[in-house]
Amino acid sequence: QVQLVESGGGLAQPGGSLRLSCIASGTIFSIYAMGWYRQAPGKQRELVASTVSGGTTNYADSVKGRFTISRDNAKNMVFLQMNSLKPEDTAVYYCNAHVASIRTGGYWGQGTQVTVSS
């Protein structure tokens, strides 16, 4: 019904930047919220940043001032600009969206790997 596809992951050096993109497709009536989560090896999945339809954003303390979430409502897309990357940002990053659809609820992308290493 609803698919989320991430792109933009890869390898970056410490202090570098990457931009993640996620597009939602399928039977979508509206999207209440979109966000990014990450999961590092051996750790639980954690919220990185989120944005609701009214524009309010929320960030994990560890990324405040370095990451910026933005959204293109017309294209059902969400972005994560990641600057000043640190090795501890290394993780699989997942897109999440709360979607009004035939089955309203939360949906996840397949994840994209971000590796920060020199």
Image: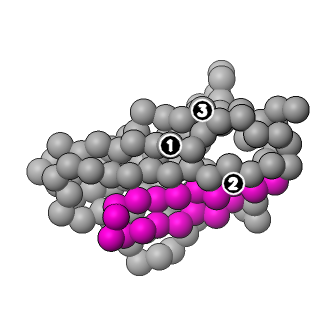
Give the amino acid type for the residue marked by disc 2 in the picture. Answer: Met
User: Cα distance, mark 2 to mark 1?
Assistant: 13 Å
Identify the residue at the far left of this view: 102
Q: Is residue 71 magenta?
A: yes
Residue 109 in sight here: yes
**Quadrant of residue 49 in the image?**
bottom right
Identify the residue at the far bottom of this view: 54
59 to 8, vertically: above or below: below
User: Magenta segment range?
Assistant: 67-84
Q: Secondary structure at mark 3?
A: strand
Disc number for residue 50: none
Magenta span: predominant SS is: strand
Number of on-image labels: 3
Side of 13 relative to 31 (left or right):
right
Find disc 1 in the rendering and name its residue.
Answer: 7
User: Cα distance, mark 2 to mark 3?
Assistant: 13 Å
Give the amino acid type for the residue marked by disc 3 in the picture. Answer: Gln
**Quadrant of residue 100 in the image?**
bottom left
98 to 118, vertically: above or below: below
**Along the polypeptide, which appears first: circle 2 or circle 3?**
2
User: Cα distance, mark 3 to mark 1?
Assistant: 9 Å
- Residue drawn at 42 percent across, 68 percent down: 72
The picture places residue 118, in percent across and down from the top left corner, at: 88, 32
Side of 41 relative to 47 (left or right):
right
Find disc 3 in the rendering and name its residue.
Answer: 113
Dot 1: few (<14), some (14–19), or many (≥20) neighbours within 10 Å? some
The picture places residue 79, in percent across and down from the top left corner, at: 52, 58
**Along the polypeptide, which appears first: circle 3 or circle 1?**
1
Find disc 2 in the rendering and name its residue.
Answer: 82
Q: Secondary structure at mark 2?
A: strand
Give the amino acid type for the residue marked by disc 1 in the picture. Answer: Ser
- Residue drawn at 58 percent across, 56 percent down: 80
